[in-house]
Amino acid sequence: MLSDDAYVGCADRERVEWMDDDPPAFEITRTALTGPGQDGRPRYADARLLGALLRRTALSVQPAGWVKAHTCSDRFDIHAKMEDRACDWVEGARRYLDSTGDTSLVREIWPVLKRQMDAFLALRTPRGLVLAREWVVWGNPVGYVTCEGAGLNAFIYRALVDAGHVGRAVGDTVDAERYEQAARDLAGAFDRVLWDERAGTYASAWFSDEVKALPANQRHQPKIAREGNRLEPTMFSALWALDQGLVPEARRDRVREYLLQHRDQAERLMTFYYLFRQLYAADTAALDREVLDTMRLKWADMIAAPGQVSWEEFSGASKAHVYGMFPGYFLSAYVLGVRPEMPATSRRILIEPRLGDLTSAEGVVGTEFGAVTVAWSVEPERFRFRFVVPVGTTAIVHLPCPAKNCELKLNGRTHDARTEGRHLCFDLPAGRYDGAAVMDRSAPSR
């Protein structure tokens, strides 16, 4: 199975493993693969590859406290130190912890994780934002620019939140509280310094003359307009702020609207992982269809290629690369609609199919609780289903309503359900279920 450039080195070029390829690597392996477990039984949502990657990244820590962006290599170039990849590493530590409940590994890497977080905090300016190279996702017009960027600061905010979560899990409440407070401070600075009231979103960065003292190879210039010290908003600044949970509730609708109005700025592959998350978060039938149409269009060449693997870019670059595989995650988690609630100790899953313009879909999704088999079909005035909720698990089920008034038929009987937005919602214990959401012609219209 393809794991190039994440769990193993990129075989055709650099021969190093990149921490930034999780996400999406673990989301793919947790939903699509099983590993060997005890007594020959499959191990679902197997996090051992992610755990090994986290450990190797910790071993790369440098005297100044930062971890390398790529490991298993003595290569030191412009990409050896990348603050954004370090944010991915911290996120990965929380994802591993929440998925497995295993505190031993995160306890092992915690001293290094603290050094990395303190290295971030040492880069704060008097404005309260971190001054470093902006988030280097392809297509970001501020990528590689040293500034107080919206992207990097959004991800550092999330890393601080995740560090607090990990710290509490390993019993270090003092540092956990310190990182949680730093996250709140950073969120306040982000909103205060970067909010653009006229645009209804966030500026791309605060860019000042402080960067003139940097080495020449770190003085990249932004490719967008500058007004005073602020760089104009783009889709990317809105995307990162929403994706990392930085937008206050009172501003969320405006920022999402800006994102949707400017989403044509997304052109290169890496951006679509984050964009798909926000299109699904908007929770509309039209955007569900748009995700599928984007996959059909932009992944067509990969599907048709003889290699039968995903690519690094829609064209060019490596033709054997994990990054292009993330549609496999979205098809599992959103079209088939199975997403485990984290942390896994909750023993709860969300089952919420988003079929877009499909009339049927079926498959198996791996979760920390076992395999979840689902089958969906759209018929006139009804939505039919079959699915299995694993033993020891409860499910929150959201089904599409074929009309404003629906009733739920479950295992041959009418079952109570509530309408929330465009979904018919109900909770279920473990078991096998067969039924349909049916238009109720006897109910008054709303």
Image (spheres, rainbow, N blue to C red):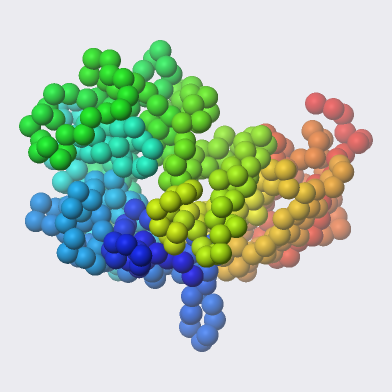
Relative side of 55 to 118, left or right: right
The foreground one among 361 and 128 is 361
Up the image or down, 356 lies above or below 201; here it is below
Q: Is residue 51 in view from this perspective? A: no
Relative side of 34 to 383, left or right: left
Q: Is residue 416 in view from this perspective? A: yes
Residue occupying image coordinates x 21% and y 65%: 73
- Give the quadrant of residue 390: bottom right
* Quadrant of the snapshot with the C terminus: top right
Residue occupying image coordinates x 17% and y 23%: 208
Relative side of 118 to 350, left or right: left
**Residue 185 spot, x, y in % from top left:** 25, 32
**Residue 222 spot, x, y in % from top left:** 27, 28
Residue occupying image coordinates x 72% and y 43%: 357
Up the image or down, 401 lies above or below 328; here it is above
Q: How many marks?
A: 0
Up the image or down, 161 lies above or below 343; here it is above
Kindly give the residue lying farthest to the bottom in the view shown.
39
Kindly give the residue lying farthest to the right in the view shown.
442
The foreground one among 124 and 296 is 296
Relative side of 335 to 169, left or right: right
**Residue 215 spot, x, y in % from top left:** 10, 38
The foreground one among 436 and 59 is 59
Residue occupying image coordinates x 66% and y 40%: 289
**Residue 33 spot, x, y in % from top left:** 52, 69
